[in-house]
Image (tube, coloured by chain):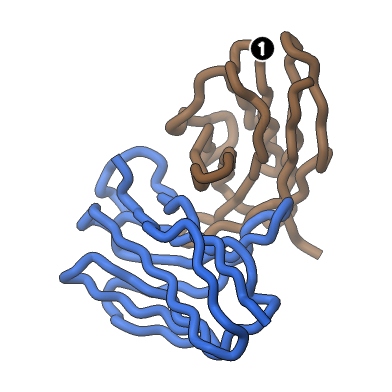
Chain colours: A blue, B brown
Amino acid sequence: DQQVKQNSPSLSVQEGRISILNCDYTNSMFDYFLWYKKYPAEGPTFLISISSIKDKNEDGRFTVFLNKSAKHLSLHIVPSQPGDSAVYFCAASAKVGSGGGADGLTFGKGTHLIIQP
Amino acid sequence: DGGITQSPKYLFRKEGQNVTLSCEQNLNHDAMYWYRQDPGQGLRLIYYSQIVNDFQKGDIAEGYSVSREKKESFPLTVTSAQKNPTAFYLCASRPTGAKGYTFGSGTRLTVV
């Protein structure tokens, strides 16, 4: 039972255009969401996050949108650059004390973003 | 510089042998985690530890063991009971109260 879903295994975008990566979740106890970026043979690095009390968070070229009613979040990258080519993981954290084990992050399967010149 | 170090970066193991992957952090983080990454599978939790001398099984703990004798160290042993050990292994840590993890650079384990 996947609680965090990234339904697009890969996405190809032209350099300079907008990249939109999507993530859906099923657990209503999630209250904090993060995006990580991962290059091959390296560990994931934190990119941007959003709390459930907000619907948007922006950091430079990266913006995350949260739609709680739809249990959906998206990461927008504008403009896309060649160095953005990587696997992007969506992750979610549940409210403390909500139970469910790890008290840590639940990850999606990732979306491989390819920026074409 | 504070960080989380995994060693070695590449590891080869013969079938039937146990092997231990190292994870050390100098971030003073309380919680530490081990994940496994396989193509198309994302990150799957193996074990985690929230304090010294305590650890819990994650979603795919079978065939693995861990210890947490020191706050800085959380080694993972891949035993011969693990049916398909070839994978990329990631260690992470998190301070109490924080939401995000800091990841190590990973260890690629190959069974030959």
Q: Pick whichever, B42 or B72, lies toward us.
A: B42
Residue B27 in picture, x, y percent from top left: 69, 57
* Location of residue B69 by image quarter: top right
The residue at which mark 1 appears reads as B80
Q: Residue furthest top?
A: B16
Residue type at mark 1? Ser
Residue in the image at 23% along x and 65% along y: A71
- Label 1 crowd (10 A; few <14 / some 14-19 / many >=20): some
Tell me the quadrant of the picture where the C terminus of chain B can be found.
top right
Kind of element beneath mark 1: loop
* Residue B67, visible in the rendered structure: yes
Tell me the quadrant of the picture where the N terminus of chain B can be found.
bottom right
Residue A85 in picture, x, y percent from top left: 64, 70
Image height of A23 relative to B30, above or below: below
Image height of A37 relative to B80, above or below: below
* Residue A92, visible in the rendered structure: no
Q: Residue furthest left?
A: A69
Q: Pick whichever, B83 or B6, lies toward us.
A: B83
* Location of residue B51 by image quarter: top right
* Location of residue A101 by image quarter: top left
